[in-house]
Image (cartoon, rainbow, N blue to C red):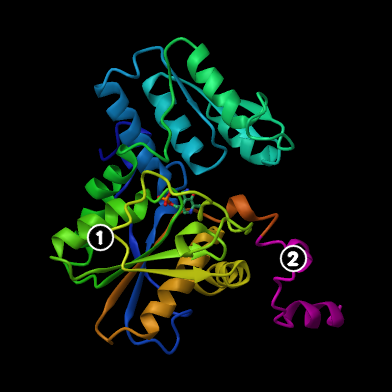
Amino acid sequence: MRYYDTVVDLIGNTPLVRLNRVTEGIEATVLAKVEYVNPGGSVKDRIAMRMVQDAEAAGLLRPGGTIVEPTSGNTGVGLALVAQQRGYRCVFVCPDKVSEDKRNVLRAYGAEVVVCPTAVAPEDPRSYYNVSNRLATEIPGAWKPDQYSNPANPRSHYETTGPELWEQTGGRITHFVTGVGTGGTISGTGRYLKEASEGRVRIIGADPEGSVYSGGTGRPYLVEGVGEDFWPDCYDRSVADEIVEVSDKASFAMTRRLAREEGLLVGGSCGMAVVAALEVARRAAPDDVIVVLLPDGGRGYLSKIFNDDWMARYGFLETSGTEATVAEAL
Ligand code: PMP
């Protein structure tokens, strides 16, 4: 019999898949690290696991404890999964702009979700930062992972994502491209790859136009999970050799191409990272190996990026003419 003891044993060891169509005209090899095959559906399962293990080891999280975090996205799912398997209660705090579908995913794993009004100032006691801080102090045995400052976030990538890529490419990786949100992925994976290659591997961050990493002030953008309006502790400024700025429009167009042309139904930050990776690949040598990390799957974005009306409303739709032709023929 061949089986895993628990679902958390499925975290990590994700595959590399070559990109074959969107790379037309490019000679270098471009490989995608497909993180949606993690059991919670994203790269964030890795950090959830390591943050919980570290908190247990440090005595911050004890049997019967509660995990409190202001998150509605992938980190919440990863934490909910790990917490449930290890017997902890989970309380997530999210703003009311977060879709009901996303809240229901967290509830499906057994987590509790506290919804806070978006239309209040950060210092308002009802703001989601304040509510999560209050819950973390008031609930006995509560622990707040804080993915933005928790060193276990970059360390999980230093210990897993980095070594996996070095091993999977037989040390032939020349460039690593990834989106930057908390900075955990780029800092941990990048540092490992720099050390393993004695500085040879180039590390490239992809960032939405307007975010601080590419020199912006936090101007709003629509791609989710990446870009910041502050510098998180998890971001190590010494790791990235270059930051490539990508517009929402280019990110979403590439996200749709990845589904249609590569069979990879992935999220918007994946499209963003691939745009940056192709820019790097165009200037690379023919035998270079560029790895781009794809953080999550596309199912959570069906009513946005994969919805023509939503795309058209923001002026993002590139019409291929196919739909029009079909409609005319009917
Ligand atoms: N893409 C998505 C969809 C994410 O949820 C995240 C995590 N915030 C990232 C990219 C960026 O990863 P990191 O936080 O490690 O910088």
Q: Which residues are magenta?
A: 305-330
Q: Secondary structure at mark 1?
A: helix
Name the side, left or right, on which 17 lies relative to 173: right
Q: Nearer the viewer, residue 160 or 93?
A: 93
Q: Is residue 89 above or below residue 52?
A: above
Residue occupying the point 14% across, 60% down: 196
Report the residue marked by disc 1: 165
* Residue 150 position in % (x across, y down): 35, 36
Label pair 2/1, CB-CB below 8 angstroms: no
Which residue is pictured at 49% across the width and 49% down the height? 230
Discs 2/1, front:
2
Farthest bottom residue in view: 25
Q: Earlier in the sequence, mark 2 or mark 1?
A: 1
Q: Hey, what amino acid is under mark 1?
A: Leu
Q: Is residue 81 left or right of residue 17?
A: right
Amino acid carrying mark 2 in the image: Tyr
Please determine whether, in this image, residue 214 is positioned above or below residue 61: below
Q: Residue at x 56, y 33 (%)?
A: 106
Label 2 beta carbon within 8 A of ligand 1: no
Q: Which residue is mark 2?
A: 314
Q: Quadrant of the N terminus?
A: top left
> Does dot 2 land on a helix, a strand or a loop?
loop
Residue 143 seen anywhere in this rendered image of the structure? yes
Q: Position of residue 119 (x, y in %)?
A: 74, 37
Q: Nearer the viewer, residue 186 or 11?
A: 186
- Say whether residue 194 is magenta: no
The answer, for residue 111, to whether it is visible in the render is no
Quick check: is 329 in the magenta stretch? yes
Percent x, y for residue 246?
53, 70
Residue 73 percent across, percent down from the top left: 54, 42
72 left or right, relative to 194: right
